[in-house]
Image (cartoon, rainbow, N blue to C red):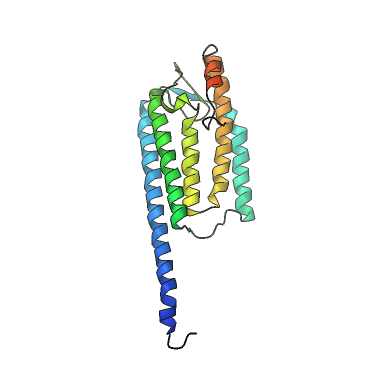
């Protein structure tokens, strides 16, 4: 210990740093929680105005079972027993930016779909092929937006959550492929060309 320096004085900078980190985590967590809550509320309200849909549960049953088993295994192995929430200024900025962009993309795509929206791997009465807005570049922008928002949440608050985001992304890829087989059947003349001119989830990449 330095001569003349009290333990309280030496501990003060560390205490300030800890206090600032806690406040930053709380602020970032609050913003993200509100964002997810608003998205869920919007989805719930908008669902009342959609066309009648028919969920094909058998199409996604296998992947749902696999994901549930993977989550249970990760919990059992302690992989998802992550440390307390933590972030720094850079992580918070990157995570919040990605989170915000993901939410905006999901909402934009949902608005473009209008009454044609449905749960993953469901079919609609009187379906329409929507190619406006973000659908001009990618065929499943809602999935992309939700995964991006989830990744932003994990980056901003807890790296361990990226494992769950990866599982959700895998589910969405499977759902997208199932849906595209259905759309190929419903729009045999227009959907193949649309597939050729766009990407599934990431513009110009995938």
Spot the residue most to the bottom: 3
Kindly identify the residue that appears in the image at 61 percent across and 38 percent down: 65
Q: Closest to the observer: 67 or 27?
A: 27
- Residue at position x 46%, y 58% in the image: 88
Task: Classify 3 as above or below 118.
Answer: below
Q: Position of residue 61 (x, y in %)?
A: 59, 33
Residue pictured at 36% horizontal, 39% vertical: 41
Which residue is more in the foreground, 29 or 57?
A: 29
Q: Give the x, y percent position of residue 123.
A: 50, 22
Q: How many marks?
A: 0
The percent position of residue 132, horizontal first and vertical second, equals 42, 22
Above or below, 148 against 55 in this view is below
Residue 46 lies, in percent from the top left, at 36, 31
Query: Which residue occupies 47% across, 46% down?
Result: 152
Q: Residue furthest front?
A: 3
- Picture quadrant where residue 196 is located: top right
Comparing 6 with 188, the one in front is: 6
Residue at the top extreme of this rendering: 189
Looking at the image, residue 55 sits to the left or right of residue 66; the answer is left
State whether residue 142 is above or below residue 164: above
Quarter that holds the C terminus: top right
Q: Quadrant of residue 205?
A: top right
């Amino acid at each position: 210990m330095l001569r003349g320096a009290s333990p309280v004085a030496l501990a003060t900078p560390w205490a300030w740093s800890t206090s600032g980190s806690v406040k930053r985590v709380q602020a970032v967590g609050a913003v993200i929680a509100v964002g997810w809550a608003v998205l869920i509320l919007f989805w719930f309200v908008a669902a009342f105005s959609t066309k009648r849909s028919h969920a094909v549960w058998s199409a996604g049953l296998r992947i749902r079972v696999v994901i549930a088993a993977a989550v249970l295994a990760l919990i059992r192995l302690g992989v998802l027993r992550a440390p307390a929430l933590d972030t720094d200024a850079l992580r918070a900025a990157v995570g919040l930016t990605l989170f915000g962009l993901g939410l905006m993309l999901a909402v934009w795509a949902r608005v473009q779909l209008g009454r044609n929206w449905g749960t993953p791997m469901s079919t609609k009465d009187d379906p329409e092929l929507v190619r406006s807005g973000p659908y001009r570049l990618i065929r499943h922008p809602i999935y992309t937006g939700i995964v991006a928002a989830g990744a932003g949440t994990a980056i901003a608050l807890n790296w361990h959550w990226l494992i769950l985001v990866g599982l959700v992304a895998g589910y969405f890829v499977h759902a997208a492929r199932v849906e595209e087989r259905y759309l190929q059947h419903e729009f045999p003349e227009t959907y193949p060309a649309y597939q050729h001119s766009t990407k599934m989830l990431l513009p110009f990449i995938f």
